[in-house]
Image: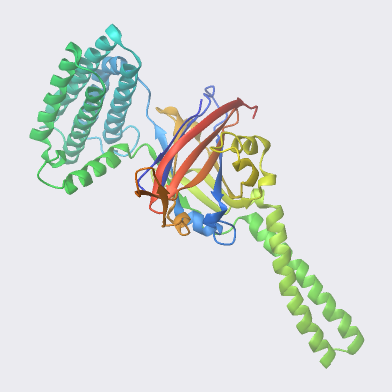
């Protein structure tokens, strides 16, 4: 199944998180390459003047940022607690034996980070379960959360004390960073549960656990403990740095691929060849008629060159339009560990006519209008953004991981607000001569389709903006249809 979250990341940025679940392949040689395709249609009101003339593909590339993140193993908290002692014993052995291969999947640094991330995932699943149940089941789940999390943290800190005098200095720092991160995650999820549930005996037990961990953080890691008397700038900076450091095994690096593709060079060369044939043909014809050295031949060659240049550009544009499906506007390589290429991301940006929209996309756009009259005068500019991701060496890539990825897209909408109206509309009321003023809003509709070869999901959201930025994002509805890949 495909899960999706669209939210505002600030006043002028949209973040779209798309979980892509990849099929489990049989062991052995199998298929090691996976593909998924994400299409996004953005419907802009024509008054915003976001069209092919004002917004070429380069502008959208500058406003768009992509991330791809792997997902740690999924274990329930109790099951993770059962296996954590053995895992920590193996990590302790790696540290005390002086293992230097810290960055590989068998090194202690990688293993420690994966332990933290699996712990975080287990807490997340436990919180989600607690919010779904009630009554006695909720009480038992709250007790399980407190006691099991405390047990895991106790095992880890025991390992931390065991390696304290034997570990290299770098290993000690890594162990401390992970301890700080786990304490931070435990208090964060604990506070989340405490704030969402009413008081109860189990609730009080969870509060005791939360307070104990908060005191532990304050005593051992004051650099990430907030103070009510300061702006906590350094605290936030250290927290973000710590999160990025622990999560580094999950993120894949995406870099722009330099140079044009072979097909692009072939099309450009073919267009140039056609134009050159025309110019050379004109030169040969006039040379045969007026001789090798004549004013008429000189004029013919100048005219031939002029038309050759125009013909080359015309043929090039037509051929690129014909082969656009295979010619992305941007290609990016995907790397793991900053050096191992494990995939490619191809993106295309093009404005399309409403008449050329797929039937299901057009039907979804015309449903659930706020006003029925919008179906009669609707005038919009439609941007089609297509992203195709291809991952290879997947058996190695997903070793020890959840066989899925989180595709994250951030879109800066600042360029789209250039022509928004800053004037306030007057709204008279019945209260004497009082007048209410309200700013104008614009609705940007977004429809997205995700295809991973077997499943196709279509979702629509409404982005409400004004001249200051995003006011809110409203999900409209979602449909899923199985498709044979």
Mark yes or no: residue 192 visible. yes
> Whole-percent x and y of residue 165?
10, 32
Furthest residue toward front? 432
Residue 92 image point, x, y percent: 21, 27
Quarter holding residue 208:
top left
Count of numbered labels shown in the rendering: 0
At a point 52% along the width and 24% down the height, the residue shown is 24
Closer to the camera in the image, 28 or 274: 274
217 vs 432: above or below: above
Instruction: Answer above or below: position of 377 versus 69.
Output: below
Quadrant in the rendering for residue 472: top left
Q: Is residue 99 left or right of residue 218?
A: right
Task: Tell me if I can see residue 68 in this picture.
Answer: no
Point out the residue furthest to the left here.
Answer: 219
Depth order, front residue of 1/36: 1
Q: Quadrant of the C terminus?
A: top right
Front-lying residue, 351 or 318: 351
Rendering coords of residue 147 (x, y %): 19, 15
């Amino acid at each position: 199944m495909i899960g999706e979250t669209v939210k505002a990341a600030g006043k002028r940025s949209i973040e779209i998180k798309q979980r892509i679940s990849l099929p489990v392949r049989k062991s052995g040689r199998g298929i090691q390459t996976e593909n998924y395709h994400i299409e996004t249609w953005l419907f802009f009101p024509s008054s915003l003047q976001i069209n092919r003339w004002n917004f070429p593909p380069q502008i959208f590339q500058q406003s768009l940022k992509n991330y791809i993140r792997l997902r740690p193993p999924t274990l329930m908290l109790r099951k993770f607690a059962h296996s954590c002692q053995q895992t920590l014993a193996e990590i302790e052995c790696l540290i005390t034996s002086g293992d230097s291969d810290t960055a590989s999947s068998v090194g202690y640094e990688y293993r420690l980070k994966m332990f933290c991330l699996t712990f975080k995932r287990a807490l997340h699943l436990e919180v989600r379960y607690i919010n779904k149940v009630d009554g006695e089941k909720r009480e038992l789940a709250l007790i399980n959360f407190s006691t099991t999390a405390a047990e895991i943290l106790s095992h880890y800190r025991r390992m931390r004390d065991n390696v304290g005098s034997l570990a290299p200095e770098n290993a000690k720092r890594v162990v401390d960073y992970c301890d700080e991160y786990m304490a931070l995650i435990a208090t964060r999820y604990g506070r989340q549960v405490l704030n969402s549930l009413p008081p109860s005996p189990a609730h009080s037990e969870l509060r005791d656990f939360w307070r104990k961990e908060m005191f532990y953080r304050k005593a051992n890691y004051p650099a990430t403990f907030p103070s009510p008397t300061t702006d906590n700038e350094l605290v936030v900076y250290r927290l973000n740095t710590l999160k990025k450091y622990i999560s580094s095994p999950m993120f894949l690096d995406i870099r722009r691929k330099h140079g044009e593709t072979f097909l692009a060079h072939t099309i450009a060369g073919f267009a140039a060849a056609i134009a050159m044939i025309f110019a050379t043909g004109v030169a040969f014809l006039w040379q045969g008629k007026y001789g090798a050295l004549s004013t008429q031949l000189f004029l013919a060659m100048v005219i031939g060159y002029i038309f050759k240049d125009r013909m080359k550009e015309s043929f090039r544009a037509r051929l690129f339009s014909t082969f656009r499906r295979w010619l992305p506007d941007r290609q990016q390589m995907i790397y793991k560990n900053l050096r191992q290429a494990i995939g490619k991301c191809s993106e295309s940006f093009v404005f399309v006519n409403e008449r050329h929209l797929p039937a299901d996309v057009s039907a979804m756009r015309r449903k659930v209008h706020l006003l029925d009259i919008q179906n009669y005068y609707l005038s919009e500019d439609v941007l089609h953004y297509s992203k195709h991701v291809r991952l290879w060496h997947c058996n190695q890539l997903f070793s020890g991981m959840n066989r899925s990825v989180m595709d994250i897209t951030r879109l800066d909408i600042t360029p789209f607000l250039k022509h928004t109206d800053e004037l306030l509309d007057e709204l008279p009321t019945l209260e004497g001569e009082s007048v209410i003023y309200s700013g104008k809003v614009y609705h940007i509709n977004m429809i997205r389709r995700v295809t991973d070869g077997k499943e196709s999901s279509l979702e629509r959201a409404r982005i409400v903006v004004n001249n200051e930025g995003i006011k809110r994002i409203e999900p409209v509805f979602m449909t899923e249809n199985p498709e044979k890949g």
